[in-house]
Image (tube, rainbow, N blue to C red):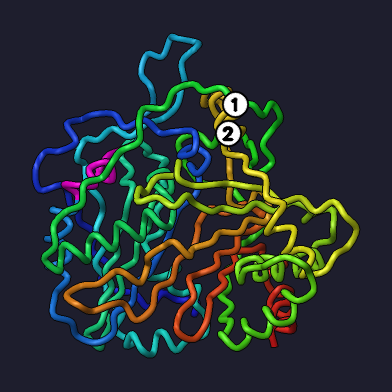
Amino acid sequence: MEASPVTGVRLSSVVPASVVGENKPRPLTPMDLAMKLHYVRAVYFLKGKRDFTVSDLKTTMFTLLQSYHHVSGRIRMPENDNDPSGLALPYIRCNDSGIRIVEANVEEFTVEKWLDLEDRTIDHRFLVYDHVLGPDLFFSPLVFLQITQFKCGGFSIGLSWTHVLGDVFSASTFMKTLGQLMSGHGLPELVYPKTPELTSHDHNGEAIAIKKIESVGNCWLLANKCNMGRYNFNISLNQLDRLMAKYTTQVDQPLSEIDILYALIWNSLLNIRGETDTNVITICDRKKSTSCWNDDLVISVVERKDERIGISELAALIACGKREENGVIKRMIEEDRGSSDFITYGANLTFVNLDMADMYEFEIKGEKPDFVNYTIHGVGDKGVVLVFPKEKSARIVSVVMPEEDLAKIKDEVTNMIM
């Protein structure tokens, strides 16, 4: 689909129902800044007519922003920073400026017919507002919510979420809370991170999980060297069972489905790119926590040093060979003092486990979405792989890769799972 089927686009703003931010600064931690150039994008689909309206969604958002007042803020830079020992790091000014609401229509499709289309990149191309921070950085909303009505009466909710606010878990929790409010439940109380301080870390080397780049200035988006594409693999439960039976018996240690799926994609990229370009992978997990911040992320690397090994051995390396780099990442960003920028997703081939993201717990008056599609925008050239939670019939593995690699990995992975 080349031309956009979306018509009647209307933009408005929603702010907290009362003054809550009080213009207070919310500092960005080093882990926030490691995600500065990345964006979480999601689309929630709801078929058929529902017992609520777009107006109900917008009205509820006023209340939701009472709790999520940092989401209504704007990015600011330190003023009159003459202290060379201080951190010249951006922060969020909680000034209740609000988020942007986009209303639109798709008159050619029902939700069901849209979801029957094989190309899932259209979800994020057309149903999520193409938003990044900047170049008018101080005026850029941190969140856009696009509500698109289909001709069947159903609709989609497209979320563009600046990653400095948190990861996929954070974004899905925001959406779940919206549903809870619309269902008549109360607001949760968010616990905000403490103000970051300069810290000391034992690791004196450079982090390899992130990549240092020149400052992008006031437009917070990575400029890729090649065109990036997306593709979703739907791996059935029967295919998963066959993969587990085939590869877990070849090594003397327990392996999870996540280990096998990571190894499957890693092995495919080794075949495509060659060994020297894909010897290191980054793995993004998160702590088991009820909070929703980037500081809950656990960023690790796995290095393949042996000569060519198979999928079982790669999975065993992933299971037991991870080296956490949170501490050295924080030190690097603190010592840089804001003079450079960093990327995490796509600095190496990057894997993200979404098992803890409660994306299907979004529920309005007892009704859940028919399909949810998440991706990461602003990914580096090495690519990112998102492994979705297991559903009733399949696991989705979503890859964001250079288009040149994408065509090849489709064949590689399809041959392995069939």
Q: Magenta region, mostly helix, strand or loop? A: helix
> Can the viewer see residue 108?
no
Q: Is mark 1 on a helix, strand or loop?
A: loop
Q: Which mark is residue 418?
A: none
Q: Is mark 2 on a helix, strand or loop?
A: helix
- 414 lies above or below 270: below
Q: Which residue is drawn at 45% across and 45% down?
A: 296
Name the residue nearer the viewer: 234 or 73: 234
Tell me if 3 is positioned left or right of 59 in this view: right
Q: Residues within 10 Å of mark 2 (few under 14, many from 20)?
A: some
User: In the rendered structure, which amino acid carries the disc numbered 2?
Assistant: Gly
Magenta-drawn stretch contains 71 = yes
Q: Residue at x 33, y 85 (%)?
A: 111
Q: Which residue is drawn at 80% across and 62% down?
A: 273
Name the residue nearer the viewer: 130 or 211: 211
Which residue is disc 1 drawn over? 201
Which residue is disc 2 drawn over? 327
Position in image of residue 326 (x %, y %): 57, 38
Q: Residues within 10 Å of mark 1 (few under 14, many from 20)?
A: few
Q: In which quarter of the image is the C terminus?
A: bottom right
Specify start and end residues of the magenta stretch as a single range: 65-74
Position in image of residue 133 (x %, y %): 40, 44
Which quadrant of the view contains residue 71? top left
Tell me if 283 is positioned left or right of 193 in this view: right
